[in-house]
Image (cartoon, rainbow, N blue to C red):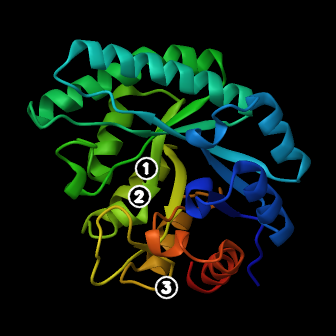
């Protein structure tokens, strides 16, 4: 019988709740993990926020998000490096072992140039991440975001990049929303696990029809993603970490969040 010991919820999933309320509600429901979005830490003592989470019997799974390395503007690329170094400081203060990277892209240049800038950006921040004992996870995004959000769009590309940089601090975050369609997904998840690069696993579902490419993610079991198949590949790859629920949805954010939290738990228990 599945329990909630490996369930993690991203704070963006219950966006209407402030961090303190999310922690209180998650913990009371038996959820053991939380991934914290950086906006929830604004105007807060980050060290105290981490202590609050742990005092509720929960674990910080990741800080979301860093990245956005690619740009035609040198000034923007330098600003992205500075922001990622700040994110590493925030993760260390919070007690987060991991930062998820949305790598970035720029429609004003080729994908190959954006990918080179992503590699250079990651390589530049990795030494400081190591000093702070924080790991980084490349999150490949669905191709619909290739123009301006990420030039890393498949597990194969993420694996290639992680292997090329070849650091124990760098891995991959598998998000089913972005990757479920990939015919090579199973073999690339196994490859990722074999190389010890599988750092995170995010779930939701793909609604049919999808009414908004960003803000219409479904609860697990509502859409067409083969969640149990993907979960079996994740397990085969040797991943034993949290299953992280990450849902962006105007529909669910408009609901009673206590009821929504119960739906999350039930869908996790029955569909993942």
Side of 132 where 246 appears, left or right: left
Q: Residue at x 76, y 71 (%)?
A: 4
Instruction: Give the Cα distance between marks 3 and 1.
Output: 25 Å
Quadrant in which the N terminus is drawn: bottom right
Quadrant in which the C terminus is drawn: bottom right
For marks 3 and 1, give the one nearer the viewer.
Answer: 3
The image shows residue 38 at horizontal and vertical percentages of: 57, 38
Instruction: Give the Cα distance between marks 2 and 3.
Output: 21 Å
Q: Few, some or many C-alpha atoms within 10 Å of disc 1 (few <14, some 14-19, many ≥20)? A: many
Quadrant housing residue 265: bottom right
The disc label shown at residue 239, or none: none
Instruction: Give the Cα distance between marks 2 and 1.
Output: 5 Å
The image shows residue 133 at horizontal and vertical percentages of: 66, 24
The residue that mark 3 highlights is 221
As drawn, 143 above or below 118: below
Q: Few, some or many C-alpha atoms within 10 Å of disc 3 (few <14, some 14-19, many ≥20)? A: some
State the residue in front, 262 or 131. 262
| Residues at circles 2 and 1 in contact by the CB criterion of under 8 Å | yes
The residue that mark 1 highlights is 192
Q: Residue at x 62, y 28 (%)?
A: 134
Q: Secondary structure at mark 2?
A: helix
Q: Secondary structure at mark 1?
A: helix
The disc label shown at residue 189, or none: 2
């Amino acid at each position: 019988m599945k329990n909630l010991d490996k369930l993690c919820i991203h704070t963006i999933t219950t966006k209407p709740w402030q961090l303190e309320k999310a922690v209180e509600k998650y913990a009371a429901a038996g959820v053991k993990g939380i991934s914290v979005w950086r906006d929830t830490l604004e105007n807060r003592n980050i060290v105290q926020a981490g202590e609050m989470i742990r005092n509720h019997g929960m674990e910080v799974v990741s800080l979301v998000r860093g990245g956005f390395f690619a740009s035609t503007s040198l000034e923007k690329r330098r600003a992205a490096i500075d922001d990622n170094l700040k994110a590493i400081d925030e993760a260390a203060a919070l007690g987060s072992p991991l930062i998820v990277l949305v790598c970035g892209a720029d429609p004003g240049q080729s994908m190959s140039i954006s990918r080179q800038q992503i590699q250079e950006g990651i390589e530049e921040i990795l030494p400081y991440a190591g000093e702070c004992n924080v790991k980084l996870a490349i999150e490949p995004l669905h191709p619909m975001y290739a123009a301006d959000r990420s030039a890393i769009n498949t597990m194969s590309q993420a694996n290639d990049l992680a292997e090329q940089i070849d650091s124990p601090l760098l891995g991959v975050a598998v998000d089913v929303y972005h990757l479920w369609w990939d015919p090579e997904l199973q073999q690339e998840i196994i490859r990722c696990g074999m190389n010890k690069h599988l750092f995170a696993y995010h779930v939701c579902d793909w609604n049919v029809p999808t009414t908004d490419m960003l803000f219409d993610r479904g609860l697990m079991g509502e859409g067409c993603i083969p969640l149990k198949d993907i979960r079996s590949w994740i397990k085969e790859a040797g991943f034993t970490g949290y299953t992280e629920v990450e849902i962006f949805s105007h529909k669910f954010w408009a609901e009673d969040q206590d009821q929504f939290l119960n739906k999350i738990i039930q869908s996790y228990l029955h569909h993942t």
